[in-house]
Image: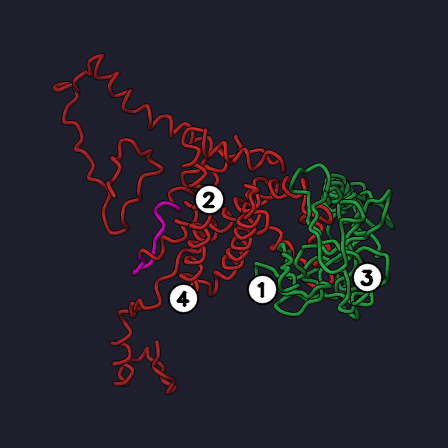
């Protein structure tokens, strides 16, 4: 108001808006504008947030742990794999099935005795199905030429880590396969990662474990 | 292009007369209405005239209520620069490809079932049993590749003609978003037939998404709706493919074309600029130093 006294051009005082009283901090018009926009924002959020939550909820949802018998204990040997097909995702028919290569743990390779090893056929490069080639004793991927040794460790091509494995147990004389887990280059189990993601060391933080996967054994 | 007769175009939509040309000559005033009264039209003639006027009347009725004729005239008769050539049709061609995808997609959706157990069967049904089903499916399948090719050619034309420069940068940005959305359409549409090829291509594509550090694994889970490719993945891709992205593409095409009309198109880079007619004489006068209006302070004689 000091400016009005010194500057004659500002002598014309704006009339007070209707309802004005001394000491008000906000005009009536401004209050209604803020209130209307605020209510609109709340109404918009009430629609958008549940929809977005619905779309991203599967990231945080972990399905039921599932075990499936794939054959009697005596079907599996130490020095080669037996191919088994079992259901990993239920309710979607054949698309939910996956392939694993199963054998007994090997004394020669100094593995823990009395266990079963189930190697996933999902290539650690981009997820194509690998095949165990008996003559070479290697897993070979048809898509981009990934090669893995007998234990599933990468020995050639673009894959970034060894092949995934499935948890195994024996119930009623049957070998059962459980949740998937990934391994580091030294075959230490870690939580399941998608193909193309490194494991071990700093990579555990750059490719964080997902809430939708099961803890490593 | 054949010119529409003026009788079927409502007055506000008619092409405005060229600035130089005078208006149509006015008819001579009637000499004497008493001695030579105008001929009265017969009943049939009146009806014929009314019938002829009907389309104009309908258009005029609509225009009176919409007031769109000014906008339409400006849009349809906007100036295009000298040198405009066939390369400028690539954008329209891309739009046409999108319309083909939209129309064929609507009819495919009438027969397609986004279920993991029935998707492949429903596509086989479309191809083998539905009349013209293989044609419509083929148009959608091959049209997808055509649209991707055309959008890249259109982008290349814009780039090499320098049409992305001021004031058209925003339209370039919108175009890039449209390109990304088109690629997203191609990616999500590839899974829908649910055969071996589309299944494994989607597996690979989702896993490539997952290789991004930190957010990659969660992005993969979001796309798959879970840790494994499953039933929800297919319905999720289907919803993205036919509801989410097409809506965004249509909205952005609207913005893209609004800016094209608003800003106009560019001339090809090889077009010579017409020099102002006075450039040479003024320069000569200035050099002669006899023109009082010319700068006298020794400034450069540029116009």
Tell me whether the residue at label 1 lies in contact with that at label 2, contact meaning CB atoms closer than 8 angstroms: no
Front-most of residues A113 and A38: A113
Looking at the rendered image, the disc whose residue lies closer to the viewer, 4 or 3, is: 3
Q: For residue A145, which numbered disc appears in the image?
A: 1
Left or right relative to B32: residue A198: right
The colour applied to the residues of chain A in this rendering is green
Q: Is residue A29 visible?
A: no
Front-most of residues B283 and B270: B270
Say which chain tag 1 marks. Answer: A
Say which chain tag 2 marks. Answer: B
Residue lying at 26% horizontally and 35% vertically, measured from the top left: B6
Magenta-highlighted stretch: main secondary structure? Answer: loop
Tell me whether the residue at label 1 lies in contact with that at label 3, contact meaning CB atoms closer than 8 angstroms: no
Q: Sequence order check: which comes first, mark 2 or mark 4?
A: 2
- Residue ID for mark 4: B160
- Residue ID for mark 3: A189
Q: Can residue B185 be seen in this view?
A: yes
The colour applied to the residues of chain B in this rendering is red
| Disc 1 to disc 4, C-alpha distance | 39 Å
Looking at the rendered image, the disc whose residue lies closer to the viewer, 1 or 4, is: 1
Tell me whether the residue at label 3 lies in contact with that at label 2, contact meaning CB atoms closer than 8 angstroms: no
| Local SS, label 4 | helix
**Which colour assignment does the render follow?**
by chain
Q: What stretch is highlighted in magenta?
A: B75-85
- Residue ID for mark 2: B141
- Relative to B222, residue A153 above or below: below
């Amino acid at each position: 108001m000091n400016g009005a006294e010194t500057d004659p051009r500002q002598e014309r005082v704006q009339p007070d808006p209707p309802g004005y009283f001394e000491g008000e901090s906000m005009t009536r018009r401004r209050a209604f504008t803020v209130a209307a926009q605020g209510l609109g924002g709340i109404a918009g959020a009430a629609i958008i947030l549940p929809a977005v939550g619905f779309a991203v909820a599967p990231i945080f949802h972990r399905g039921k742990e599932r075990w499936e018998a794939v054959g009697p204990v005596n079907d599996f040997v130490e020095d080669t794999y037996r191919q088994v097909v079992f259901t990993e995702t239920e309710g979607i028919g054949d698309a939910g099935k996956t392939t694993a290569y199963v054998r007994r743990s090997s004394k020669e390779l100094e593995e823990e005795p009395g266990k079963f090893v189930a190697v996933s056929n999902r290539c650690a490069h981009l997820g194509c199905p690998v095949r165990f080639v008996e003559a070479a004793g290697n897993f070979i991927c048809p898509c981009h030429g990934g090669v893995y040794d007998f234990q599933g460790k990468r020995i050639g091509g673009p894959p970034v880590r060894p092949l995934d494995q499935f948890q195994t147990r024996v119930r009623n004389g049957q070998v059962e396969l459980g949740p998937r887990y990934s391994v580091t280059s030294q075959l230490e189990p870690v939580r399941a990662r998608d193909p193309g993601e490194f494991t071990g060391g700093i990579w555990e933080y750059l490719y964080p474990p997902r809430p939708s996967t099961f803890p490593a054994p | 292009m054949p010119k529409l007769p003026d009788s079927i175009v409502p007055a506000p939509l008619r092409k405005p007369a060229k600035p130089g040309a005078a208006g149509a000559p006015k008819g001579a005033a009637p000499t004497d209405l008493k001695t030579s009264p105008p001929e009265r039209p017969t009943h049939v003639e009146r009806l014929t005239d009314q019938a002829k006027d009907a389309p104009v009347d309908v258009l005029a009725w609509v225009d009176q209520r919409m007031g769109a004729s000014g906008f339409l005239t400006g849009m349809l008769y906007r100036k295009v620069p000298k040198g405009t050539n066939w390369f400028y049709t690539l954008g329209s061609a891309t739009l046409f490809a999108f319309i083909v995808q939209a129309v064929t997609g609507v009819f495919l959706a009438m027969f397609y079932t986004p279920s993991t157990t029935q998707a492949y069967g429903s596509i086989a049904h479309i191809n083998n049993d539905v009349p013209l089903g293989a044609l419509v499916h083929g148009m959608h399948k091959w049209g997808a590749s055509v649209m991707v090719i055309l959008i890249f050619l259109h982008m290349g034309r814009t780039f090499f003609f320098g049409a992305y420069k001021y004031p058209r940068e925003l339209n370039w940005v919108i175009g890039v978003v449209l390109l990304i959305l088109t690629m997203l359409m191609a990616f999500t549409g590839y899974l829908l037939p649910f055969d071996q090829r589309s299944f494994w291509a989607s597996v690979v594509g989702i896993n490539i998404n997952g290789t991004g550090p930190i957010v990659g694994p969660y992005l993969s889970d979001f796309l798959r709706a879970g840790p494994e490719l499953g039933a929800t993945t297919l319905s999720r891709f289907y919803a993205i493919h036919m509801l989410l992205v097409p809506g965004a593409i249509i909205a952005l095409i609207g913005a893209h074309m609004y800016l094209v009309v608003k800003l106009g198109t560019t001339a090809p880079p090889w077009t010579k600029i017409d020099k102002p007619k006075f450039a040479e004489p003024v320069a000569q006068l200035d050099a002669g130093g006899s023109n009082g209006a010319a700068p006298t302070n020794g400034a450069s004689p540029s116009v």
